[in-house]
Amino acid sequence: MALDFAATYKVLVLGDSNVGKTCIVHRYCDERYYDTYISTIGIDFKQKLINLDGVPIKLQIWDTAGQERFRTLTTAYYRGAMGILLMYDVTSLESFNNLSYWLRNIQENAAPDVVKVLAGNKCECNPPQRAVDKERGEKIAENFDMPFFEVSCKQNINIEDAFLTLARKIREQREHRGENFDDGDRQKGLQDMIKNGPGSNGLGPFTLGSGGDGGRCSC
């Protein structure tokens, strides 16, 4: 059967627990917002077919657990990642300070030229709740050569822009390297990864278990 998309881009969503990683994946892929979640246990993924400047592209978006006890598992999924959406919560200084951990983890486990976009979630918060000024996010993004967006899963602010920017930068990098969009071996590898991964219906069984931080996502 002929593929109805030109390429598949594997994207990881990384960051501390409760910064809104699952919220942003659901908001972008399902166009829905959920204000309660059981924290992701391990790894989950969803897929979205997008029109990238007239070219159909499949985004395979992997939602990773931020809890420390799952981070060893998470590192196994860096392999083959073309892009990373790195998130923090503008109401949590700790999640911002921990970006140094995630950037070091990316450096150690991801491809050297992996594309990165930085997103500060919950930008709709009231000023007294904000712990991280926008300028601080812009500064760290500039230092690490990443596009930067303040986003809101709750109010659907800059979600699509963040993912489309990531996809465009992945495409630019592939074109620069002269990679073939119709690389059958790459497609087969991605299909095998889906088959052997946590689930093929968009929501793997890891998200349905008890444990993790549980409760409200606050995203």
Image: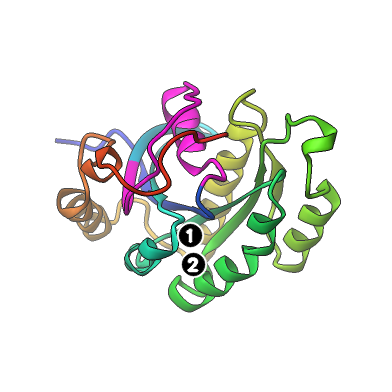
**In the image, which disc is placed on residue 71?**
none
Percent x, y for residue 33?
50, 23
Please report the residue visible at 32 percent of the width from the left and 46 percent of the height from the top.
44
Q: Which residue is mark 1?
A: 174
Image vertical order of residue 82 relative to residue 131, above or below: below
Percent x, y for residue 34?
47, 24
Q: CA distance from mark 2 to mark 1?
A: 5 Å
Taking the image as shown, residue 119 lies to the left or right of residue 218, namely right
Percent x, y for residue 205?
21, 42
Q: Residues within 10 Å of mark 1 (few under 14, many from 20)?
A: some
Percent x, y for residue 8?
35, 47
Badge 1 marks a residue whose secondary structure is helix
Taking the image as shown, residue 214 lies to the left or right of residue 126, namely left
- Circles 2 and 1, Cβ within 8 Å, touching? The answer is yes
Residue 128 on the magenta segment: no
Q: Which residues are magenta?
A: 18-45
Please report the residue visible at 15 percent of the width from the left and 49 percent of the height from the top.
195
| Tag 2: amino acid | Arg
Nearer to the camera, 84 or 206: 206
Taking the image as shown, residue 69 lies to the left or right of residue 209, namely right
Q: Which residue is mark 2?
A: 177
Please report the residue visible at 42 percent of the width from the left and 24 percent of the height from the top.
30
Q: Quadrant of the C terminus?
A: top right
Nearer to the camera, 103 or 219: 219
Tally of numbered tags = 2
